[in-house]
């Protein structure tokens, strides 16, 4: 009796289906990574904007240190988000001789609130004096609504922001 030798040449349908399944799972994983990367990039962009606005305020505070007490703007998120001033063309006392630190501080606060609201969705501002130090210091908290974020942010000071609002706080010492 003769034995017939069988040499396999090629792949079976099952092997092809298994390799396609492994490839599909890998592609789904890569798509998930891409979606998360986009989400975290947006969060990073919001934090970068908040950081730039906070440092702009710190520069303004240092330039007008005589108006330190006039920068205090202690409001909750709901109060501050509803309080967006109309644009001004320039500093009200820019051409006057009697321009004082209080007027400059008031202009700076209005300008920063408008800027914050334009650059961050639902942007709001809270500035309070830091009473825990012997130096003159302000705690500046910027708040904004971030899409897809619905829990309370642990970096928000107690009671000023509801769930779904992100906060960035900067302490400015003069």
Image (spheres, grey):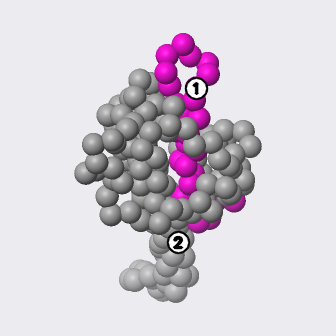
Q: Is residue 59 left or right of residue 38?
A: left
Q: Could you say where residue 59 lies in the image, as x and y percent from the top left? A: 34, 37
- Classify mark 1: helix, strand or loop: loop
Residue farthest along the front direction in this orientation = 97
Quadrant assignment for the C terminus? top left
- Numbered disc in front, either 2 or 1: 1
- Residue 63 within the segment the image draws in magenta: no
How many C-alpha atoms fall within 10 Å of the one at disc 2: few (<14), some, or many (≥20)?
few
Pointer 2 or 1: first along the chain = 2
Mark 2 vs 1: CB contact within 8 A = no
| Quarter assignment of residue 65 | top left
Whole-angstrom CA distance, mark 2 to mark 1, is 49 Å
| Quarter assignment of residue 63 | top left
- Classify mark 2: helix, strand or loop: helix
Q: Could you say where residue 103 lies in the image, as x and y percent from the top left? A: 42, 44
Q: Residue at x 61, y 22 (%)?
A: 131
Q: Which residue is drawn at 50% across and 25% down?
A: 137
Near-viewer residue (160 or 98) = 98
Q: Which residue corresponds to mark 2? A: 28
Q: Give the range drawn in magenta.
A: 123-151
Q: Which residue corresponds to mark 1? A: 130
């Amino acid at each position: 009796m003769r034995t017939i030798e069988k040499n396999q040449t090629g792949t079976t349908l099952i092997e092809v289906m298994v390799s396609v399944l492994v490839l599909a799972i890998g592609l789904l994983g890569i798509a998930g990574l891409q979606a998360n990367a986009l989400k975290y990039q947006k969060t990073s962009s919001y934090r970068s904007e908040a950081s730039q606005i906070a440092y702009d305020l710190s520069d303004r505070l240092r330039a007008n240190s005589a108006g330190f007490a006039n920068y205090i703007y202690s409001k909750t998120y709901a109060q501050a988000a509803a309080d967006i001033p109309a644009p001004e063309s320039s500093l009200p006392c820019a051409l006057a001789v009697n321009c004082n630190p209080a007027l400059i501080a008031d202009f700076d606060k209005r300008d920063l609130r408008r800027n914050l609201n334009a650059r961050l969705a639902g942007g709001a501002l809270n500035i309070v004096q830091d009473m825990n130090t012997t130096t003159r210091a302000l705690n500046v908290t910027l708040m904004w609504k971030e899409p897809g974020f619905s829990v309370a942010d642990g970096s928000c000071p107690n009671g000023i922001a509801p769930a779904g609002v992100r906060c960035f706080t900067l302490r400015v010492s003069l």
